[in-house]
Image: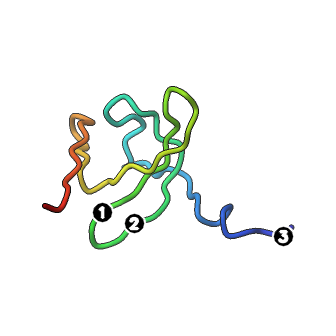
Amino acid sequence: MQRDAATEAFRPLQTDDPPVVAGYRLAARLGAGGMGRVYLSPTPGGRPVALPGSGINVVTGDLTIWRAP
């Protein structure tokens, strides 16, 4: 079976990943590194969005996005 770059970019959620963040149902993990994890989620309209895991409070599921000034 041939794999492409897009298929390999999506990883299943792990047991320590929250299933929902700020109302967004997480579909997959896109990556992880020194700044945290990045998740894939569909919007209510069906568009895919990336959610930065560094701003997720894993206890409450709240999402905070930090922006550079």
Could you tell which of marks 1 and 3 lies nearer the N-terminus?
3
Q: Looking at the rendering, in which quadrant would you find the C terminus?
A: bottom left
Q: Secondary structure at mark 2?
A: strand
**Residues at marks 1 and 3 touching, judged by CB atoms closer than 8 Å:** no
Q: Mark number for residue 36?
A: 1
Residue 23 rendering spot, x and y as whole percentages: 36, 28
The residue nearer to you, when weighing 11 against 45, is 45
- Could you give the CA–CA distance between mark 2 and mark 1, rounded to whole angstroms? 6 Å
10 Å neighbourhood of mark 1: few (<14), some, or many (≥20)? few
Q: Mark 3 vs mark 2: which is more N-terminal? A: 3
* Residue at the extreme bottom: 34
Q: Note whether 51 is above or below 5 in the view shown.
A: above
With 1 as the anchor, is 42 left or right in this view? left
Determine whether the residue tagged by mark 3 lies in a helix, strand or loop: loop
In the rendered image, which quarter is residue 18 located in? top left
Foreground pick, 58 / 31: 31
Circle 3 is placed at which residue position?
2
Which residue was labeled with disc 2? Answer: 32
> How many residues crowd mark 2 within 10 Å: few (<14), some (14–19), many (20+)?
few
